[in-house]
Amino acid sequence: MMREKIKIRKIDYLPARQVTFSKRRRVDLKNAGELSILCESEAVVIIFSQTGKLFDFSSSRYGFYGRRLEGSTLIVESTGC
């Protein structure tokens, strides 16, 4: 049996939207980590929740040494290239 394609659209029911965000965020961060390991590549994921909370992942061996918010702009300073 084939799965049906779903139309991507905003989830109107707030509790369901928050649960979906939480589950998909975890999966996306995990996938970025696996991709960086399997392909020996650098990966950076930055996610802002609806409330403005920051979630990030960096596979860089250099890492990020500075992160600050100015207004609604995230400024990330990296020690590597």
Image: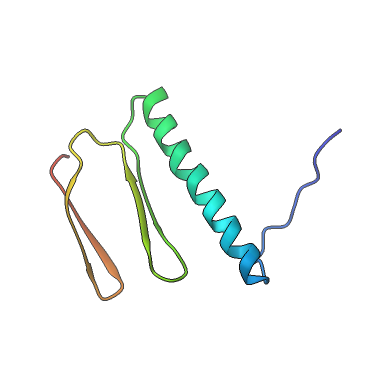
Q: Residue at x 47, y 37 (%)?
A: 31
In which image quadrant can residue 61 be found? top left
Q: Which percent across, then down, holds residue 68?
A: 20, 63
Q: Which percent across, then down, holds residue 2?
A: 83, 36
Q: Which percent across, then down, holds residue 56?
A: 34, 51
Relative to 67, residue 4 above or below: above
Q: Residue at x 54, y 57 (%)?
A: 21
Nearest the viewer among 81 and 74 is: 74
From the viewer's perspective, is 78 left or right of 22?
A: left
In which image quadrant can residue 16 be found? bottom right
Nearest the viewer among 57 and 19 is: 19
Location of the C terminus by quadrant is top left
Relative to 2, residue 51 above or below: below
From the viewer's perspective, is 75 left or right of 47?
A: left
The residue positioned farthest toward the right in the image shown: 1
Nearest the viewer among 42 and 20 is: 20
Q: Which percent across, then down, holds residue 7?
A: 73, 57
Q: Residue at x 46, y 38 (%)?
A: 30
From the viewer's perspective, is 20 left or right of 25?
A: right
Instruction: Identify the coloring.
Output: rainbow
Relative to 5, residue 11 above or below: below
Question: Looking at the image, how many numbered discs can be counted on the residues?
Answer: 0
Location of the N terminus by quadrant is top right
Q: Residue at x 34, y 45 (%)?
A: 57
